[in-house]
């Protein structure tokens, strides 16, 4: 991300989406990628006879964890310490970033290698480290591509979904100094591998997120596809894991359910290629210094909302994103949060306290419900979207929409007022209606409708007028 | 069941029409067609004249106070009817899923509310309503019919029973058309892009009409077809079944 991006306040979703819609390449790639991954997921899920029961179990495990978070986090801290790790508590992004910066500084490093991590995207750790002279190198292939192009990830799981291989070839030619590179995928992968391997061998400090952490054993779990995560969590001397507090599971045994739900929902695989599980420090094997940073950053606020807290069940699989018809059109950048798509639209506003740009996100949905059908932990995303909308609306005192809907609400409370409104609409439309349709619109909310659609005019006889005339006859 | 037996059974039901505010004001032909179908089956539907809106738009837009008031009003207006029939998947879904909680006391009204095709197939147990149609139709399963009401293939079973109707499969049928109530205005650009994809699918079938169980989605799709200058019509399932 360049400096200008960081200084400019992000646009609300409708404006950002309009921009994204102008990017034809992005939309072609999105359509192709989401179609492929949806189909893969559907096949992988159809194989499991008790999938719906697994979803019930996943939801129950996460609910149990969230209800006993106070106890589980202390248990986790205790056992990680006993196993030779250090546990840090971070109230917000700034605290988490400065904890990580201090650890890196103490290790005398100026570079860290990173496992793909949404949580550190959320805290903007890379930018914070850069500010203190530490280069954070992303080692997931797609994250690396995004980082080298100075952009932000556009998809939770497939961060470079908006780029095609020609663009990647040009990027590698320029950024990695490989002028003869072709756009052959295996050649591109080999180039990235050679570049990354040097970094893995050089790095003294690695930073990861966590998919899960088990409160009973203190084990931390990272699930990935490329093996870069395994390199990061085993090769360097120092390993720092930044983890949202909602990632804790009561027991190691709960992984039995979670590790079935996650890969099938996210990549459509029966099992992901690499699952790294480590517990504190193992003397003489792997990193000899392990730090676990437990991040709140708004999560306890989410937890306090009895309805909204269900969003904390999320295991970041991205199934909801891949089926979302809105995301499919816009991609992730329009959301201005690492958590794009339906889950981002319910999680980010809550993390932010329904303030700022993210307050526009709950409205970035038609409530079509495709997300709820695929969620492996049964988050009722449409219900939470409506819940968030109500919070945003309750905080607004003015505005055209409030005035219009307030008036409509009062009008619908009386059938007389409603009938009067029907007659007024018939009068008001006169200058605009032609052959039963309205194609040109006066200024106001209807003009937005009219940009791409005609509207039927109110006919000479409403249904109830017809019914009454029939009654008389 | 023979037609005569079906009619005799249906005649015992006294449904009330919930015609919906949008259907009343912008698509009265759908309500008239609904009446025609029910009457053909021997029923004498009632139309409680005090009805206005179920409050779905307010609820979905986040205006809960209005949604609560309109839910209570809905219960008052429809209390006492043994079956409440709405030619709208999304309004029926709102009543069934939300009104009980919003109104606090619903006197069984939510449970007695039916979307039209569900009412015909499940309550009156009829799939052949003795209609005829000439031409090809493609069916768009609207989101709330599909995922909230779980109508499944009930509307299709009604359409398949219509002689002369050629049913053409809609590609990517389960994708949302982009309406979404206030979404169509608040996020106009995305809504239009979603509509474009839906219109492309509809037109690719070559069908003479696209049919659905929701006047709101049909308003969106129909408005888009008209803007494109297409001759393909957007018709409600009631209009097809009334023919």
Image: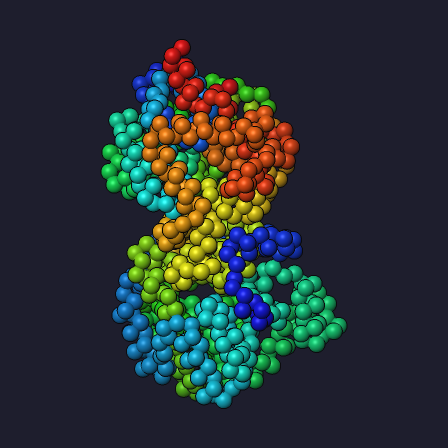
Left or right, A306 with reference to A10: left
Total numbered circles: 0
Q: Say which of A468 and B168 sits in front.
A: A468
Q: Please tell me whether residue B151 is drawn above or below residue B238 in the rendered image.
A: below
Q: Residue A117, can we see it?
A: no
Image coords of residue B56 (percent x, y): 39, 39
> On the rendered image, what quadrant is the N terminus of chain A found in?
bottom right
> Which quarter of the figure has residue B106?
top left
> Which quarter of the figure has residue B234?
top right
> On the rendered image, what quadrant is the C terminus of chain A found in?
top left
Q: Please tell me whether residue A408 is drawn above or below residue A142 in the rendered image.
A: above
Task: Give me the residue at 47% from left, 49% from top.
Answer: A365
Image coords of residue A263 (percent x, y): 47, 60
Judging from the image, the colouring scheme is rainbow
Task: Give me the residue at 32% from left, 21% from top.
Answer: B14
Task: Give me the residue at 47% from left, 61% from top.
Answer: A339
Q: Residue furthest right?
A: A180
Task: Give me the residue at 49% from left, 62% from top.
Answer: A337
Image coords of residue A320 (percent x, y): 47, 53
Left or right, B173 with reference to A363: right
Q: Say which of A312 and B79 sits in front.
A: B79
Q: Residue A473, can we see it?
A: yes
Image coords of residue A181 (percent x, y): 72, 70
Q: Please tell me whether residue A261 is drawn above or below residue B240 in the rendered image.
A: below
Q: Residue furthest top?
A: A473
Q: Say which of B7 and A407 sits in front.
A: A407
């Amino acid at each position: 991300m360049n400096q200008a991006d960081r200084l400019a306040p992000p646009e609300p979703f409708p404006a950002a989406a309009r921009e994204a819609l102008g990017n034809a390449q992005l939309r072609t790639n999105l359509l192709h990628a989401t179609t492929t991954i949806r189909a893969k997921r559907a096949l992988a899920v159809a194989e499991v006879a008790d999938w719906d029961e697994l979803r019930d179990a996943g939801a129950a495990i996460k609910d149990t964890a969230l209800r006993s978070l106070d106890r589980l986090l202390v248990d986790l801290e205790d056992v990680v310490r006993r196993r030779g790790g250090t546990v840090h508590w971070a109230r917000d992004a700034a605290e988490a970033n400065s904890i990580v910066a201090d650890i890196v500084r103490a290790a005398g490093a100026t570079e860290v290698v990173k496992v793909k991590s949404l949580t550190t995207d959320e805290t903007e750790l890379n930018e914070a480290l850069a500010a203190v002279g530490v280069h954070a190198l992303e080692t997931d292939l797609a994250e690396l591509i995004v980082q080298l192009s100075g952009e932000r990830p556009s998809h939770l799981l497939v961060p470079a979904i908006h780029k095609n291989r020609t663009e990647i070839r040009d990027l590698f030619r320029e950024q990695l100094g490989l002028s003869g590179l072709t756009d052959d995928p295996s050649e591109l992968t080999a180039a990235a591998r050679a570049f990354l391997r040097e970094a893995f061998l050089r790095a003294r400090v690695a930073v990861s997120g966590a998919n899960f952490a088990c409160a009973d054993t203190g084990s931390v779990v990272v699930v990935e596809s490329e093996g870069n995560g395994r390199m990061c969590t085993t090769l360097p001397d120092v390993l720092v894991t930044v983890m949202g507090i909602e990632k804790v599971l009561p027991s190691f045994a709960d992984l039995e359910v979670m590790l079935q739900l996650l890969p099938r929902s996210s990549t459509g695989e029966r099992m992901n290629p690499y699952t790294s599980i480590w517990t504190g420090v193992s003397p003489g094997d792997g990193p000899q210094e392990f730090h676990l940073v437990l991040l709140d950053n708004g999560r306890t606020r989410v937890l306090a909302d009895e309805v909204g807290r269900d969003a904390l069940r999320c295991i970041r699989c991205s199934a909801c994103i891949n089926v979302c018809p809105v995301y499919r059109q816009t991609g992730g950048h329009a959301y201005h949060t690492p958590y794009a798509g339906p889950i981002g639209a319910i999680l980010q506003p809550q993390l932010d306290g329904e303030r700022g740009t993210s307050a526009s996100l709950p409205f970035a949905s038609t409530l079509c419900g495709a997300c709820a059908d695929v969620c492996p932990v049964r988050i009722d995303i449409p219900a939470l979207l409506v819940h968030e909308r109500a919070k945003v609306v309750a905080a607004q005192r003015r505005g055209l929409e409030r005035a219009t809907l307030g008036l409509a609400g009062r009008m619908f409370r009386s059938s007389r007022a409603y009938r009067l409104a029907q007659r007024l609409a018939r009068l008001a439309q006169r200058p605009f209606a032609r052959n039963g349709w309205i194609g040109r619109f006066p200024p106001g909310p209807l003009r937005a409708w009219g940009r791409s659609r005609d509207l039927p005019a109110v006919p000479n006889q409403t249904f109830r007028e017809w019914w009454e005339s029939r009654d008389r006859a | 069941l023979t037609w005569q037996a079906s009619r005799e059974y249906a005649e015992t039901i006294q449904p009330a029409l919930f015609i919906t505010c949008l259907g009343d004001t912008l698509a009265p032909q759908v309500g008239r067609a609904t009446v025609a179908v029910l009457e053909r089956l021997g029923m004498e539907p009632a139309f409680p004249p005090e009805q206005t809106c179920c409050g779905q738009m307010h609820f979905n837009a986040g205006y809960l106070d209005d949604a609560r008031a309109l839910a209570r009003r809905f219960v008052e207006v429809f209390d006492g009817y043994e079956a409440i029939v709405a030619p709208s998947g999304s309004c029926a879904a709102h009543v069934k899923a939300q009104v009980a909680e919003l109104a606090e006391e619903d006197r069984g009204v939510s449970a007695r509310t039916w979307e039209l095709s569900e009412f015909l197939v499940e309550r009156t147990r009829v799939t052949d309503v003795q209609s005829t149609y000439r031409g090809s139709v493609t069916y768009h399963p609207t989101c709330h019919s599909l995922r909230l009401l779980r109508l499944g293939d009930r509307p299709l079973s009604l359409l398949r029973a219509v002689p002369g109707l050629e049913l053409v499969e809609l590609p990517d049928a389960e994708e949302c058309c982009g309406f979404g109530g206030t979404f169509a205005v608040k996020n106009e650009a995305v809504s239009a892009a979603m509509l474009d994809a839906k219109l492309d699918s509809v037109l690719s079938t070559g069908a003479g009409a696209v049919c659905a169980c929701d006047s709101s989605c049909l308003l969106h799709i129909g408005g888009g077809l008209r803007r494109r200058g297409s001759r393909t019509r957007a018709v409600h399932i009631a209009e097809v079944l009334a023919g």
